[in-house]
Amino acid sequence: MFDQCLFVFCNRGRDKIKILYWERNGFCLWQKRLEKDHFKWPKASDSHTIILNEERLHWLFQGVDISQIKPHKTLHDERAN
C-alpha cells in the first residue's frame, strides 16, 4: 500500500526534515537536522500536498529552492509552418 511513498515533513523553523516511509512490516522515521541553515521549503499549495520526484527531493536536501526551478522555454520552429 505505502511501498512507493515517502511522506516528508518540515518543522516551523525549517531546520529539520522528517521522512516517514513503510518498510516490509512497519513504518520507519528518518530525520535530518541542519546546524546552521534552513531548508528552502516550498510554499503551501491549495492541496498542501506536493509530489516530488527523487531528484527534487535531493535538491531540497542540498538547499535548492525547488519552487523557483523552471525549465527552459519550449521553442517552436517557425520555419516548419
Image (cartoon, helix red, strand yellow):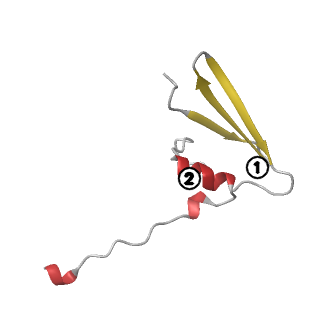
Q: Residues within 10 Å of mark 2 (few under 14, many from 20)?
A: some
Residue 46 rendering spot, x and y as whole percentages: 52, 45
Q: Is residue 43 visible?
A: no
Residue type at tag 2: Arg
* Sequence-earlier tag: 1 or 2: 1
> Which type of secondary structure does the marked residue at label 2 adopt?
helix
Q: Which residue is mark 1?
A: 14
User: Does the rendering let one see residue 53?
Assistant: yes
Q: Nearer the viewer, residue 58 or 14?
A: 58
Q: Which residue is mark 2?
A: 56
Neighbour tally class for label 1: few under 14, some 14-19, many 20 plus, Cα within 10 Å:
some
Foreground residue among 44 and 11: 11
Q: Amino acid at mark 1?
A: Arg
Establish if 31 lies above or below 41.
above
* Count of numbered circles in the view: 2
Q: Is residue 50 left or right of residue 12?
A: left
Q: Is residue 55 left or right of residue 39?
A: left
Disc 1, disc 2: CB below 8 Å? no
Residue at the image position 15 percent from the left and 79 percent from the top: 80
* Distance CA(mark 1)–CA(mark 2): 17 Å
**Residue depicted at 59% across the width and 24% down the height:** 22
